[in-house]
Image: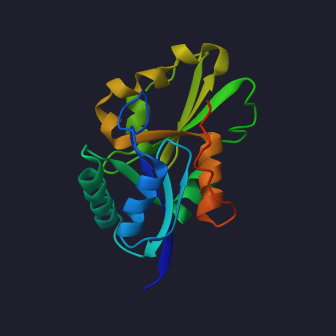
């Protein structure tokens, strides 16, 4: 059976003092599941690992069960293969991430059964502040930095689809792709910006 690189994006850990998980402990859970080349990136719960090709739903379920058993709280992840993450980066709108002094760029990763278009319909961009575009696997969200607190993205936690999404900034997304493709190693101590 062929080996496949995956990226697990954990939802809601190490945010606002909730669901605190050390990255070394997180890596240990993935290693105990038999995954190899396990790396984490920053404190928001990004795990890059290698395993034998398997159904994504089965992998997701096994990882969530192991995380809940280890850390004692509900765990939800969005799991993507390295090729799916490459597709997310490749499908980004033209010039996405190119003006970081003016805009914040976020990728809203969507877990099945939800779809990016469904999230976009619920999270209508605010004219003059937001711009959003649904791709096949993710929603691309650009916010005016000077008015970021007025962005509709701040309302994401009030939506019905909230349990099926997780957000990563563009720089983190690109870094995770590089890690998944074997181009860089993670830096567990770095803090995510923007």
Which residue is rendered at x = 73% and y = 39% of the image? 95
Give the residue at x 75% y 25%. 101
- Work out whether 47 lies above or below 22: below
Which residue occupies the foreground of this view, 54 or 18?
18
Q: Residue furthest bottom?
A: 1
Nearer to us in this view, 88 or 18 = 18
Quarter of the N terminus within the rendering: bottom left
Rendering coords of residue 145 (x, y %):
65, 20
Position of 2 relative to 99 (above/below): below
Q: Nearer the viewer, residue 192 or 52?
A: 192
Q: Is residue 80 visible?
A: yes
Image quarter of residue 52:
bottom left
Q: How is the image coloured?
A: rainbow
Residue 97 location (% of width, % of height): 70, 38
Q: Is residue 8 left or right of residue 76?
A: right
Q: How many marks?
A: 0
Q: In the displayed structure, does residue 119 sit left or right of residue 38?
A: left
**x and y, in percent, of residue 67 in the image:** 31, 54
Q: In the rendered view, would you say 4 is above or below 173?
A: below
Q: Is residue 91 visible?
A: no
Q: Is residue 60 left or right of residue 139?
A: left
Which quadrant does the C terminus fall into? Answer: top right
In the image, 10 versus 119, the foreground residue is: 10
Q: In the rendered image of this protein, does residue 147 appear above or below residue 22?
A: above
Residue 3 spot, x, y in % from top left = 48, 78
Rendered residue at 25%/57% (across/down): 65
């Amino acid at each position: 059976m062929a080996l496949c690189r995956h990226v697990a994006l954990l939802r809601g850990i190490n945010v606002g003092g909730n669901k605190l998980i050390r990255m070394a402990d997180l890596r240990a859970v993935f290693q105990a599941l038999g995954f190899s080349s396990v790396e984490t990136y920053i404190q928001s719960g990004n795990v890059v690992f290698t395993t034998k090709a398997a159904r994504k739903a089965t992998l997701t379920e096994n990882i969530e069960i192991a995380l809940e058993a280890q850390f004692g709280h509900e765990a939800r992840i969005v799991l993507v293969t390295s090729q799916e993450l490459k597709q997310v980066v490749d499908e980004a709108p033209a010039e996405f991430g190119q003006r970081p002094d003016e805009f914040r760029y976020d990728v809203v990763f969507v877990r099945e059964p939800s779809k990016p278009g469904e999230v976009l319909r619920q999270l209508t961009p605010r004219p003059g502040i937001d711009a959003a575009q649904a791709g096949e696997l993710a929603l691309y969200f650009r916010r005016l930095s000077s008015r970021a607190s007025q962005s509709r993205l701040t309302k994401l936690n009030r939506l019905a689809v909230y349990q099926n999404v997780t957000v990563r900034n563009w720089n983190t997304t690109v870094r995770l792709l590089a890690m998944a493709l074997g181009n860089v190693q993670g830096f567990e101590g770095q803090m995510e910006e923007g």
